[in-house]
Image: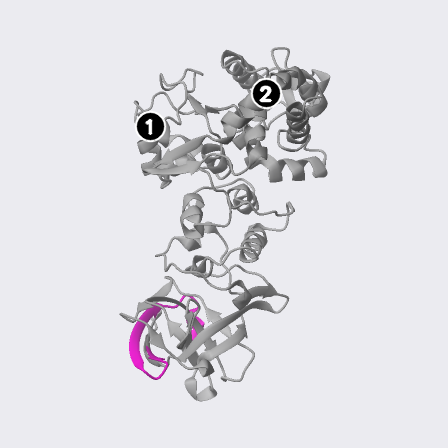
Amino acid sequence: MPEALKEVLEEFTRYVNNDIPIRLISLPEKKLVGRSAVEQYFRPLMDEITADMIDEERVKVRIDQDFTYPVHSDRRSAVRALVQERVQYGILSHRWLREGEPSCKELIKQRNLSGPGYEKLQRFCEVAISHGMKFAWSDTCCIDKSSSAELDESIRSMFRWYRNSAICIVLLAQSTSTGDMTDDEWFTRGWTLQELIAPKKIKFYDNNWEPLTRQDNDKNEDDDEHILSAISKDTGITTRNLLRFVDPGPFYIRERMGWAAKRTTTRDEDVAYSMTGIFDVGLQIAYGEGGDRAFIRLIEALMQVTSDTDILHWKGQAALLPHTRALPPSPAAYMVRSIGGSHPKDRFAMTSAGLRIKLAIFPSPLISVDQEMGIATLACDVAGKHEITLKVEVLERQLLNMDPDDGCKWFIGVFNYIDSRAGPEIAGVSGCYLLMTTSWSSTDWIKVSTKDAITFDMKGTVVFEEKYLRTVYL
């Protein structure tokens, strides 16, 4: 066997058994098949791939905003691309009906195959065939939801399955034209966020299964029908990310949380689960744990792999968990000003005692309190060098009644300070927490919830003494 073919077959086998859905609909007979049948069908196409084709694929480049990038990082990536070009399937993105969607077992047994849900599946299969597909996938019937293991794998893999599809067929069941398409409920749901950005090729259809545009691919750089700009305006996702979301991973946390902030899910936990592919983090699926706990587990997973300071910068009430009140409950908390910069990962970690974090802590006694509005005015003594006045709206208003004479002290804790040769420095724009404790030596620190994220600008950097640095548990 030629070395190139051996290389191709190894990648082909790995790809089919790991990076495409567990089962697909074989078209046009609408029969569910597993990966082995898919592998058998596409195997002859692997013989087409030659060593010269691999070499040509290897040197491909992409021009993006006047910069030239290699398309493939290594030879294996080039081989994978050639394999993926041939292992094709269509994938459906849609809003579920309240009832009547065909299940995996019903399709296997060929029972109860009637009604609006099955009619939708039939139309999808017809459209997939019209795009040259031999296989298709729909979340309604291609996942055996009675198997917790299969459901877990499917949810964890779904971003990758949409990304690897040859075409994502989107049914906008409330739309009749490009003029009203962004009003469709599809654009407001949690799971459809990844279904919008992950695929390389998307085709939108209206409520009568008619294509909404004349374009072959609605992710089109030319975008003659200007739908991407309308989608970008409505969703807050840049057209660049809509066209080519090339870097799933723990990056641009504030921006990506903003994409999900106004979306809703039927199950609270899905707010977190639907974002794992975008951030490329693993999260065990545990329906019943509650939305707050699921989202905190997402934040914990991100904290293990990111140094993006924005993960600490959020507003509003904290998630209600027994071991911490220092982490947010949803993506909406991250709709704040970016403070930029990075934060060494060893400065913070989740523990059984709460969020362990190293902060630059400065005394900030109360100047005045507006009990009716819940606004506290604080005089912040920054490293004994500058005094700034902060006004913050405190959400836990009962804390404003605490008597300083009883030992209650207020502080701000800056988390994006900089380590420099001269010593620790306050950054140009500082993000900080409002803290309360009864004593500097106390281990009982409280992060006070505020309506807005707290920032201040020192108009330059300020070096401060190490004595202001303290590791606390929140």
Query: Could you say where residue 127 lies in the image, as x and y percent from the top left?
Result: 50, 15
Relative to 368, say whether 59 is above or below: above
Label drawn at residue 50? 2
Q: Quadrant of residue 89?
A: top right
The residue range painted magenta reads: 379-399
Relative to 248, say whether 3 is above or below: above
The alpha-carbon separation of the residues under discs 2 and 1 comes to: 39 Å
Q: Residue at x 63, y 51 (%)?
A: 289
Q: Looking at the rendering, in which quadrant would you find the N terminus?
A: top right
Q: Are marks 2 and 1 in contact (CB under 8 Å)?
A: no
Q: Secondary structure at mark 2?
A: loop
Label drawn at residue 43? none
Query: Could you say where residue 315 lies in the image, as x and y percent from the top left?
Result: 41, 60
Please state which amino acid type lies under the numbered disc 1: Ile
Relative to 274, say whether 18 is above or below: above
Would you say residue 466 sits in the magenta stretch?
A: no
Q: Is residue 149 left or right of residue 369?
A: right
Instruction: Tell me if I can see residue 373 in this picture.
Output: no
Query: Could you say where residue 33 lies in the image, as x and y percent from the top left?
Result: 69, 20
Question: Closer to us: mark 2 or mark 1?
Answer: 2
Please state which amino acid type lies under the numbered disc 2: Thr
Q: Is residue 407 left or right of residue 338?
A: right
Q: Mark 1, residues whose alpha carbon is within 10 Å: few (<14), some, or many (≥20)?
A: many
- Which residue is under mark 1? 227
Would you say residue 392 sits in the magenta stretch?
A: yes
Q: Residue at x 55, y 26 (%)?
A: 54
Q: Is residue 432 left or right of residue 135?
A: left
Q: Quadrant of residue 465?
A: bottom left
